């Protein structure tokens, strides 16, 4: 979620502001902040109560936010916040959609309680809320998802977070779709926990690169979660919150409908666009168990340029290896070309022209798994480590993690790569997409 704004923003004078200062927030207002681009920002709650994306702040404890992080501190009843350090932007706002957001949470809470009650009796257990959050790019979908998850976790539920936005990657790196249970309110600084994620590597930052592969992975993820829910009444009652991409027109709209159907979503929250709300309401009218709800987007959300979005992706990849506060130490490893097998999914003719009917053209197979020669083209590429047992399983298998290629030695036939952990990789099968990163 990107925050910015004019009005009372202290953009120009932020660097000259006192290092430590206090901000008093009135009830149902929020402080919108963008940390300075080069230095971290410390923040603490002095009195009252306040939260960041649904997670309550502890009183009198300093939290350190890394450079460039954008967030908002909201209070229901009033609070005093203390800031230590410079910001690019910080300003208060008393017009927020938080009341409507928490009302949605209250309705979802009721459905979870109802689902849990049914699962404890003799009747067939009912499904808890499966919420899908949709809307255009930069409408606050991921932030609303975090709020709903954290509020549910605070009530003792363990909802499943599903992230289908390959452009940004809320759970892991960009280029993936993933799911993970949320057992505690999400840490305001560290974000989504990475203890038990189920991750599928799509390999590109837009579904348009290989629409059929995107559909396949969405279906695969949904089927695995369905099996988990069948044997876990607690997860089934808690339900899921599904974050989606910002591509909502044409094929993007069709992919949204596919996700709604595949995950059997029963609550569709539409942020920030009347046209999309109207279209979804009409097309889902024949599904009485699906509620389509229009919500206002926060006034703190601003559109990001393509350059800013690319920079955000780069930070997400760096964060995977080094941590959000630069507190992790990735390992540099060397492997022989012969010990690794690199593949890509998609492309290549489905059949030679001679094998096709007269007049027919070869059609690219979007799910074809093709070997990739290890050469200089792999330099600065992010590769996924697949759990597949055989190459033909790669297109439908989840991944263990990611490595980053830092050097290719053609003479010695050795590849140097960065990995989050030391030791051998859990698999010899690596998957390549178009995801690259230039470490700075």
Image (tube, rainbow, N blue to C red):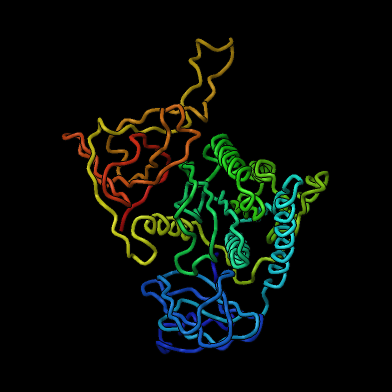
166, above or below 324, in the image: above
Report whether 222 appears left or right of 281.
left
Q: Residue at x 46, y 42 (%)?
A: 201
Visible in this render: residue 134?
no
Residue 226 locus on image (x, y percent): 62, 42
Report whether 341 appears left or right of 198.
left
Residue 267 locus on image (x, y percent): 72, 54
Q: Residue at x 29, y 49 (%)?
A: 418
Occupied quadrant, residue 374: top left
Residue 356 locus on image (x, y percent): 55, 12
The N terminus - image quarter: bottom right
The C terminus - image quarter: bottom left
Query: Which is more toward the observer, 416 or 434?
Result: 416
Instruction: Name the residue furthest front.
Output: 122
Residue 339 locus on image (x, y percent): 26, 32
Visible in this render: residue 183?
yes
Number of marks in the rendered image: 0
72, above or below 13, in the image: above
Report whether 75 appears left or right of 59.
right
Q: Residue at x 79, y 48 (%)?
A: 289
Query: Which is more toward the observer, 75 or 348?
Result: 75
């Amino acid at each position: 979620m990107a925050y910015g704004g004019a009005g009372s923003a202290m953009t120009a004078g932020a660097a000259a502001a006192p290092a430590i200062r206090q901000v008093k927030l009135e009830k149902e207002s929020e402080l919108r902040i963008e940390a300075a681009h080069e230095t971290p920002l410390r923040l603490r709650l002095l009195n009252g109560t306040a939260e960041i994306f649904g997670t309550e702040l502890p009183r009198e404890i300093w939290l350190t936010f890394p450079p460039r992080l954008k967030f908002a501190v909201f209070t229901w009843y009033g609070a005093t916040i203390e800031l230590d350090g410079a910001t690019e932007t910080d300003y208060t706002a008393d017009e927020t959609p938080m009341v409507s957001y928490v009302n949605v949470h209250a309705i979802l809470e009721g459905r979870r309680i109802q689902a849990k009650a049914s699962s404890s009796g003799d009747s067939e257990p009912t499904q808890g809320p499966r919420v899908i959050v949709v809307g255009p790019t930069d409408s606050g979908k991921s932030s609303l998802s975090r709020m709903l998850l954290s509020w549910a976790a605070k009530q003792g539920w363990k909802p499943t977070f599903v992230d289908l936005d390959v452009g940004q990657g809320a759970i892991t790196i960009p280029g993936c779709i993933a799911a993970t249970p949320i057992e505690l309110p999400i840490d305001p600084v560290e974000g989504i926990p990475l203890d038990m994620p189920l991750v599928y590597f799509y390999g590109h930052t837009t579904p348009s690169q290989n629409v059929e592969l995107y559909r396949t992975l969405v279906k695969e993820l949904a089927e695995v979660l369905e099996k988990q829910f069948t044997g876990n009444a607690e997860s089934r009652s808690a339900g899921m919150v599904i974050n989606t991409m910002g591509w909502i027109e044409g094929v993007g709209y069709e992919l949204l409908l596919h996700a709604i159907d595949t995950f059997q979503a029963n609550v569709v929250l539409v942020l920030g666009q009347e046209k999309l709300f109207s279209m979804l309401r009409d097309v889902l009218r024949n599904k009485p168990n699906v509620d389509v709800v229009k919500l206002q987007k926060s006034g703190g959300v601003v559109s990001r340029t393509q350059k800013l979005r690319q920079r955000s992706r780069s930070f997400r990849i760096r964060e995977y290896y080094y941590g959000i506060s630069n507190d992790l130490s990735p390992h540099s490893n060397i492997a022989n070309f012969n010990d690794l097998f690199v593949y890509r999914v998609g492309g290549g003719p489905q059949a030679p022209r001679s094998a096709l009917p007269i007049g027919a053209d070869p059609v690219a197979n979007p799910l074809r798994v093709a070997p990739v020669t290890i050469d200089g083209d792999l330099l600065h590429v992010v590769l996924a480590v697949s759990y597949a047992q055989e190459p033909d399983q790669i297109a439908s298998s989840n991944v263990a993690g990611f490595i980053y290629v830092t050097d290719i030695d053609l003479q010695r036939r050795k590849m140097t790569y960065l990995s989050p952990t030391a030791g051998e990789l859990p698999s010899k099968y690596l998957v390549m997409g178009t995801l690259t990163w230039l470490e700075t």
